[in-house]
Image: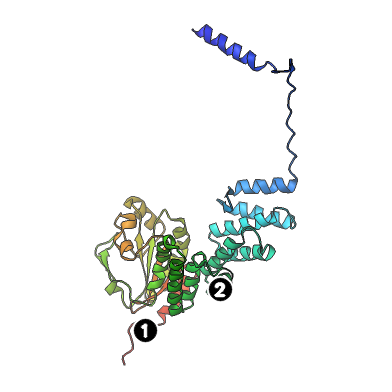
């Protein structure tokens, strides 16, 4: 049997070398046209995209950026200011800085793209990302200006920019205007037959609607220590209620800002209550210890069904609420240096309501 198999293999190999006949004559071999060699400029850009793991799906662009990859991209843009790849390179730069959580730099990068290619294929998404980057880098007024322009250009699609515009209004202290805007967005979407999109919009608005209202009451077990965390006992302090998880990269990007704010203001009456949506306690405990998260923690291992996550209708993280000394929510979804800035402002307010 082994000899027979070997014979079959030999016959197949020999047959593959026979040139097929066409009209009794050997079929001419077709030699493909060699692909033109890429120019140094194109070869360089392709190598950068490979390093950044850029991939596309329709008009969407995805990447897994690194600091060195972004540095190479910056060098490319300087070396080839009139490159045929410039629009794509500028967009990938903004996206990369956004994903690296360098929001202030991302906002600048998106603005350069939009100024250079105002009618480009990435314009709409770049405008939203620029506004969001301004929000996350604690620049709510410039963000609102950009979002107002976007709303004027696209009045029939408020779901595109509704969350960001509501957030900008809240950060600027214009809570009533924010609530009216959120109501308008939801009613406009329903009237336009976008019922399927409304629940998602409502989930995004939920934390913002809590601003200006008393914090919901709760009493839960304190993780890593005896006792409970009682919301009523927190009054008199400025408190950040923060929902997070060790597997959430955006949450981890915010951690240095939280730790810096706590170290600076803890003795003046600032407290953090972190609610972990992790599942494994060992990993959580090791992380808390390693990262020196020396504040209050709650954990029950139920992930998205965590008692407080359900109470506060949390569907995405990071999510946080900043509460003043009187127990009133004063901000939601703060990012970066905005945490310390708002905490310092609230610490200047009295711990009790003035008597009439």
Residue 264 visible to an observer of this rendering: no
Q: Residue furthest bottom?
A: 356
Q: Nearer the viewer, residue 235 or 177?
A: 177
Task: Residue 339: name its quadrant.
Answer: bottom left
Question: Would residue 96 be found to the left or right of residue 181 on screen?
Answer: right
Q: Tell me: residue 12, above or below residue 158.
A: above
Residue 326, position as x, y percentages in the image: 33, 79
User: Which residue is depicted at the point 60% across and 11% down?
Assistant: 11
User: Which residue is depicted at the point 37% across and 57% down?
Assistant: 288
Task: Residue 33: name its quadrant.
Answer: top right
Quadrant where the C terminus is found in the figure: bottom left
Q: Nearer the viewer, residue 330 or 352?
A: 330
**Which numbered circle lies on residue 172?**
none
Residue 57, position as x, y percentages in the image: 56, 49
Residue 7 visible to an observer of this rendering: yes
Residue 32, position as x, y percentages in the image: 73, 31
Q: Residues within 10 Å of mark 1 (few under 14, many from 20)?
A: few
Q: Tell me: residue 274, above or below residue 170.
A: above
**Residue at disc 1, secondary structure:** loop
Q: Which residue is mark 1?
A: 350
**Which numbered circle lies on residue 148?**
2
Task: Mark 2 or mark 1: name the one nearer the start of the chain.
Answer: 2
Disc 2 versus disc 1: nearer the observer:
2
Q: Residues within 10 Å of mark 2 (few under 14, many from 20)?
A: some
């Amino acid at each position: 049997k082994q000899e027979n198999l070997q014979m079959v293999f030999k016959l197949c190999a020999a047959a593959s070398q026979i040139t097929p006949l066409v009209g009794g004559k050997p079929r001419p071999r077709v030699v493909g046209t060699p692909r033109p060699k890429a120019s140094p400029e194109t070869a360089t850009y392709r190598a950068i995209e490979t390093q950044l793991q850029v991939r596309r799906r329709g008009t969407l662009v995805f990447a897994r950026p690194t600091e060195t990859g972004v540095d190479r991209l910056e060098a490319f843009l300087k070396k080839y200011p009139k490159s045929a790849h410039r629009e794509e390179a500028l967009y990938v730069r903004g996206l990369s800085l956004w994903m690296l959580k360098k929001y202030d730099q991302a906002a600048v990068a998106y603005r350069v793209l939009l100024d250079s290619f105002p009618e480009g294929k990435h314009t709409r998404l770049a405008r939203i990302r620029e506004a969001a980057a301004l929000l996350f880098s604690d620049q709510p007024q410039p963000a609102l200006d950009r979002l107002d322009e976007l709303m004027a250009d696209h009045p029939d699609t408020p779901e595109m920019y509704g969350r960001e515009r509501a957030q900008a209004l809240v950060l600027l202290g214009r809570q009533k205007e924010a609530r009216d805007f959120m109501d308008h967005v939801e009613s406009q979407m329903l009237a336009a037959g976008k019922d399927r999109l409304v629940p998602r919009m409502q989930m995004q608005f939920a934390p913002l609607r809590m601003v200006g209202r008393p914090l919901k009451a709760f009493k839960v077990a304190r993780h890593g220590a005896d006792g409970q965390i009682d919301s009523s006992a927190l009054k008199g302090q400025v408190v950040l209620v923060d929902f997070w998880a060790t597997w959430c990269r955006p949450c981890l990007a915010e951690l240095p800002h939280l730790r810096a704010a706590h170290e600076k203001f803890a003795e003046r009456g600032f407290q953090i209550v972190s609610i972990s949506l992790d599942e494994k306690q060992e990993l959580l405990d090791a992380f808390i210890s390693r990262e020196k998260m020396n504040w209050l923690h709650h954990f029950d291992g139920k992930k998205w069904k965590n008692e407080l996550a359900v109470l506060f209708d949390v569907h995405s993280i990071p999510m946080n609420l900043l509460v003043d000394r009187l127990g009133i929510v004063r901000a939601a979804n703060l990012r970066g240096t905005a945490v310390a800035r708002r905490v310092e402002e609230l610490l200047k307010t009295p711990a009790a309501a003035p008597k009439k």
